[in-house]
Amino acid sequence: MSEEAAAGPTGVHPIEHWVLHVDLDQFIAAVEVLRRPELAGKPVIVGGDGDPTKRGVVSTASYEAREHGVGSGMALRLAARKCPDAVFLPVDRDAYDEASAAVMSTLRSLEWGGRPVVLEVLGWDEAFLAAGPEPGHEAVSGRTGRLGRGRPWASAADEVERDEATEASPVVEAGQGSLPPVQQEAAASSGRGPTGGSNPDPVAFAADVRARVLEATRLHCSVGIGDNKLRAKIATEFGKPRGSFVLTAENWFEVMGDRPTTALWGIGGKTGKKLAVLGIDTVSQLAASDARVLAAELGPTMGPWYHRLGRGVSDSPVSAEPWVARAHGRETTFQEDLDDWDRIAEEVRALTRQVKEDIDKEGRPAARVGLKLRYRPFITISRSLTLKTATSDADELAEAAVSLLDRVEKDRPVRLLGVRLEMVPPESGY
């Protein structure tokens, strides 16, 4: 996608109808280039300990490396074959934590339309933004009620009024924080910095967000603008890099209709194949499908939910409440395959004790134990069990994890092991 992205019509909807999704461009690679300016413009691949001769996977690749077909999750050795001139660097989580904290702090400082924003952090490099309550109207328990929900009731079939100016001049926003002439006045009146302004225009505010993040952190981001979280999240990909895109009920099928169902946030390869068996290959076909058939084939909860995804419908509000982990896990890839099952059991125990330390920080015991095992060359299986009694005892958890080895075939070498501990819910629930 070029640095200039076409945005759908923004209309004249109130500020409460808009959700923004902010996504840092090539975040990990960008942080590394900031630390090593001489790498700017070069293919950079971050993963493992930075040695492409060892087993490991790509955490991120710069745009220059992506042009050679390198992508996240790819084996480092394969990445080296695809892009032999790339600079390989080890993962540095502390550096990414620090950069992420600076970005999120910048976003929290913003005001939109004279209102403090509500920020929902999704990870190191992405977050949702919505306008918070009007001054004098405090949010309850960190939530905004209808604020930040967008327009969940707005399906692509809705007839939404547009003003004549918007109809005649669809918004086109340029990257690098600039705006076309039709939006310059709006951008100027939106205000910069924590003091903000009164203009609720989401396109102008998206440009402000990108400019503020760049000014504060020297990192570029893209911003998806939607009338709910689902559409905002998907819109971001059309704005990359360094741009914005508007995706609403008005242009949903125009933009998404002919795309595969896997283009939807929440539908992966496995679900896409299940839908294909039902003759559903595109977003339009999913939206036009019979929800009752989906419920019968994919489950009474997931089937109708997939149907809603096809129509771009979401009613989840933007929430500033801290994310509460359901589980923690760790895994390790061995440089040489293991075929000694006593050694494998010891590795499982060691991993379990590491994950136990992670859940101790949450203050909740484990109720379920999971094991991930990858054979040579690349066949992955998983096993799990629910404990009779939740516990934080390291020995009990380790033995429970090891017991899952009795449920796997032991006729092939093992290249990867992983352990996952699912905790009991917090008292207040998720």
Image: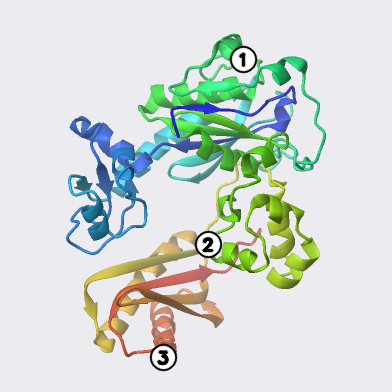
Q: Are marks 2 and 3 in contact (CB under 8 Å)?
A: no
Which disc is residue 412 wearing?
none
In this picture, residue 423 sits left or right of residue 335 = right
The spot of residue 354 in percent (x, y) is: 35, 68
Q: Amino acid at mark 1?
A: Gly
Which element carries disc 3, helix, strand or loop? helix
Looking at the rendered image, the quarter that the C terminus falls into is bottom right
Q: Quadrant of residue 17?
A: top right
Mark positioned earlier in the residue sequence (2 or 3): 2
Mark positioned earlier in the residue sequence (1 or 3): 1
Q: Is residue 214 above or below residue 416?
A: above
Q: In percent of the image, x 66 and y 58: which residue is there?
A: 428
Of labels 2 and 3, the one closer to you: 2
Mark positioned earlier in the residue sequence (2 or 1): 1
Q: In percent of the image, x 29 and y 39: which residue is there?
A: 64
- In the picture of the structure, the residue carrying the numbered disc 1 is 197
- In the picture of the structure, the residue carrying the numbered disc 2 is 269
Give the CA separation, mark 2 to mark 3.
Answer: 29 Å
Q: Amino acid at mark 3?
A: Asp
Q: Is residue 191 above or below residue 29?
A: above
The spot of residue 386 in percent (x, y) is: 55, 80
Q: Is residue 129 above or below residue 327?
A: above
Which disc is residue 406 wearing?
3
